[in-house]
Image (spheres, rainbow, N blue to C red):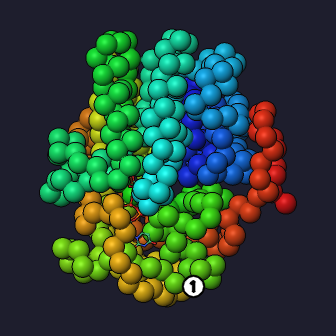
Amino acid sequence: MPETVLVTGGAGFIGSHTCVELLGHGHDVVVVDNHVNSSPEALDRIAKIAGRPLAGAYRADVRDRKALREVFSSHPVDAVIHFAAHKAVGESAARPVEYYDTNVAGTCALLAVMHEQRVHRLVFSSSCSVYGDAGTVPLTERSPVAPTNPYARTKLMCERILEDVCDHLPQLKVLALRYFNPVGAHPSGLLGEDPRGVPGNLMPYVAQVAVGRRAQLSVFGDDYPTPDGTGVRDYIHVMDVAEGHRVAVGHLDDRTGMRVFNLGTGTGTSVLQLVAAFGEVSGRPVPYRVAGRRAGDVAELVADPSAVAAAWDWATTRDLTAMCRDAWRFQELHPDGYSCRPPRAGGPTTGESPCG
Ligand code: UFG
């Protein structure tokens, strides 16, 4: 069982919840994050919830090999979970070069330093969006892939690179997890999703409308071939995603090479169903208007989660009500998010508390 886990993007939405889960199960955790879309405040919250500190936290970009080398030299890293990446579909169409640079070049830089430092265990953060429009739902890991936007293509490219590297470096053990749509928050209300600027994803947008920070939701298309015409997704509670990563770390040594797993619930929910569920849980109806389709979107993405269940004897447990309830608790407690000042440049971030 890997003891010390390096988590890139550990202050981000999924990363921070995964750190809590790892610390709670006895791992030592080191975070690397450049805070381009995350707050250092999340690091203090992680330690508070877990009741013990991170082994280290560094403000650094994953493309910065020198910085990565220093982190690896300072900690006995046994395994890496690589979250650090850009993740918004719409933004990826507007800023594709940035997406390829951070997501693909960042993964290569990390792999290079891991190789130098003889660290051979990696859990890679992939995405259901690699399936694109190609498959019929539910999607298994053998469903055809056909990404429809630059973000999804960066994830598929990384998978291909990892597969090829594993073929040539037999000591490597890689698990790529294709997660569906992570939402929700830690049940304590201390940790949650706090995107910078206008939220690119549905659940944080809905939560910000409910709390009064935004006037109304734009529903991107109601003419899809789905029961109510709006996009259907497999929303998964972020605590289930975090748990899935912790379980994955324990299975890295099952065998060498590259393996790919879906991380989803198997249940599809439309935009309008999510809006209704959130309104019910929060007691605040969410006003919306139907807008045009968003470029790069697909009608339906729902997982067949049976491969992970068979391999790890593990399944998700939290339903849509829990996802909405926990997302709402965080939003209600933090109407303006973590509301931090911009982080200071350079150096370790542990112990800093930039929030007033
Ligand atoms: N949607 C709206 N209005 C919004 C935002 C989204 O109607 O303001 C709709 C979308 O059209 C889609 C559904 O809500 O039908 C979900 O959209 P998201 O943007 O929340 O998520 P995506 O399905 O586009 O998935 C992307 C990535 C995933 C990632 C997920 C959460 O492809 O890999 O975001 O970060 F997991």
Q: Which residue is mark 1?
A: 215
Residue 87: x, y in percent?
Answer: 47, 51
For residue 100, which quarter of the picture? top left
Whether residue 237 is visible here, answered yes or no, is no
| Local SS, label 1 | loop
Residue 8: x, y in percent?
Answer: 57, 36
**Residue sitting at the far left:** 136
Whether residue 217 is visible here, answered yes or no, is yes
For residue 193, which quarter of the picture? bottom right
42 versus 57 height, above or below: below
Crowding at mark 1 (Cα within 10 Å: few <14, some 14-19, many 20+): few
Q: Amino acid at mark 1?
A: Ala
| Residue 70 as seen in the image, left or right of residue 18 | right
Q: Say which residue appears at 76% left-offset and 58% top-offset.
A: 340
Residue 98: x, y in percent?
Answer: 52, 45
Residue 181: x, y in percent?
Answer: 39, 57
- Give the position of the C terminus as an image quadrant: bottom right
